[in-house]
Image (cartoon, rainbow, N blue to C red):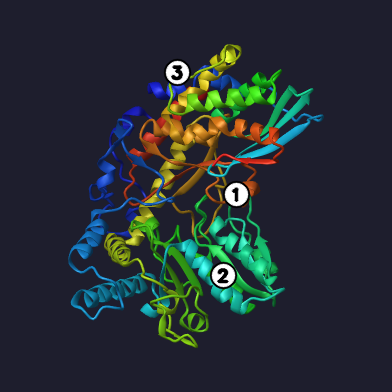
Amino acid sequence: MRDDLRDLYQSVILEHARAPHNFHRLEDASLSAHGDNPMCGDQLTVFLRLDDGVIAEAGFIGHGCAIALASASLMTDLLRGRSAARAEQLFAALETMCGTNHPDEVDVPEQDRAAVDQLRVLSGVRAFPVRIRCATLAWHTMRAALHGKSHASSE
Amino acid sequence: MQASETSKTRELSGTAAVGGPPYRAPREEFPILSRPVNGRPLVWLDTAATAQKPRRVLDAMRSFSETRYANVHRGVHTLGYAATQAYEEARLRVAQFIGASGADEVIFVRGATEAINLVAASFGRSFISSGDEIIVTELEHHSNIVPWQLLRESTGAVLKVAPIADDGTLDLVQLEAMLGSRTRLVAVTHVSNVLGTVLPIATIARMAHAVGAHLLVDGCQAVPHRFVDVQAIGADFYAFSAHKMYGPTGIGVLWGRRELLAAMPPYQGGGEMIASVTFEQTTLKHPPHRFEAGTPPIIEANGLAAACDYLTDLGLARICGHEAALRAYALEGLATVPGLRVIGAGGNHEDGRAGIISFTMDGVHPHDVATVLDGSGIAIRAGHHCAQPLMQRLSVPATARVSFGLYNTTEDVDALVAGLGEVGEVFG
């Protein structure tokens, strides 16, 4: 198999896709939003439970490709304990990694370094421009929820 | 399937039944098929989304542009006349190709989507009113759903949906039961773009006409793959796109029965569609020009005519036989792939299936299937195929779809099956 495909479908991605973490509805969610990718039909709902301005728990349901599911799985792990501002910072780092910049060039505050390292597995989408939105769907949806919007579309 | 068998193209059963020499896919006439993709020869299995272009179509557009190009129905100059002649000859060519009773029944539009919107806007707003019923099927593409929803919003018409069986065939008993005195229009696809189901249009036409309803057929997936005679099948409107039939983008056809078109108001206003204009009153042209406001796709019309010639010369019966044989061959190959499930297959329909197969693979999302295959130069479609209600009916969020064209070979199928083996290795 080609190297870029191997990068895209790293074993970590496949493991998360096969058994996504936090793959459930949060009955006591403070915020939630629905996200879809109209190009491909992927659909996720992201739930956030905030405690004193900090994301105490995150979960999601829906369906999507391996990249979309793995990204949502990782995201819901990494959001725990973060404020809205720090959640958005992490998304910004991911967007940069999935875009034009090499992961090593992403400028990350010290406190986020470990999280960003975990997200590196998603940076394989850089070689597959049409798949970038798969990696960011959950994050757009999370951002919509934080902004009080019910819906996000990764167009 | 043995690896040793994959090295050469086999002669397919099914093509012989049509007669003549065995069908040979004219790959060399399609320049794009010789380009590598991701280091492998391109295997184009996405013809249902759009068909690749043969040299004959490309040459026709280039030659017209280089020697006869001008705007149509305007200039008194030599080229204006030559371009108008070519444009109207293209219309006549299309009319012959689909069995229209005259060129005046052929309206050039941007594509099938615009054709259906034209009928909804013009025929719909004039002849469909509150409480009248429009019937579509669960198989429809969004382009044969949304225009009717918009019409429903503006007129108060009722939109009904005829169900399909699990094997993807239309339930004719239920369709007939839905038809009634309020039914104004039945709008159905000729061939499902997701499952390849071929609908019995002549039967549906008889049912619709028996209650005084008209029949619109979305022929996008039929016209490039089987012989279509719009009058013989009893349609009242027939819509299709050139780009799916090896012609250019930007042009499509609405065919309509002459008396229906004559009774319909314009769809858009502008140049080309008027006989005379004053600020007090505008006199409209007759069909088809009444429905062609503005400068039409002139170059593309020449490409479309060339595509009609191309398909006619190759022989639609032979193309249809070849693609049916490829479908059968592919189903055998796909049956060897672990965890692969063909969606909506297995029906025994008199008209069989067209060369379109949807499938899913256990534990692998269709997008991931498509991405891995693309790594081997194999292009398939993954997603909802602009038919989300059908996906809901089939209880799948998305499918992977392969669709065959006249240039595909058993080698393409073998590459697909090998590629799916690789998918299994990655995700297994």
Tell me if label 2 and label 1 are in contact, CB under 8 Å: no
**Same subunit, tags 1 and 3:** no
Q: What's the CA distance linking mark 2 and mark 3?
A: 54 Å
Tag 3: Cα neighbours inside 10 Å, few (<14), some, or many (≥20)? few
Tag 1: Cα neighbours inside 10 Å, few (<14), some, or many (≥20)? many
Q: What residue did someone put label 3 on?
A: A105
For residue B120, which numbered disc appears in the image?
A: 2
Q: Which amino acid type is marked by label 1?
A: Gln
Front-most of B64 and B295? B295
Q: Can residue B14 be seen by looking at this rendering?
A: no
Chain of the residue displaying label 3:
A
Label 2 secondary element: helix
Label 3 secondary element: helix
Residue B135 lies, in percent from the top left, at: 63, 66
For residue B388, which numbered disc appears in the image?
A: 1
Residue B228 lies, in percent from the top left, at: 41, 67
Q: Quadrant of residue B211?
A: bottom right
**Same subunit, tags 2 and 3:** no
Q: Which amino acid type is marked by label 3?
A: Glu
Residue B261 lies, in percent from the top left, at: 48, 80
Residue drawn 69% across the image and 26% down it:
A23
Label 1 secondary element: helix
**Same subunit, tags 2 and 1:** yes
Tell me if label 1 and label 3 are in contact, CB under 8 Å: no
Tag 2: Cα neighbours inside 10 Å, few (<14), some, or many (≥20)? many
Q: What's the CA distance linking mark 1 and mark 3?
A: 40 Å
Q: Is residue B79 above or below residue A41?
A: below
On the rendered structure, is A58 left or right of B21?
Answer: right
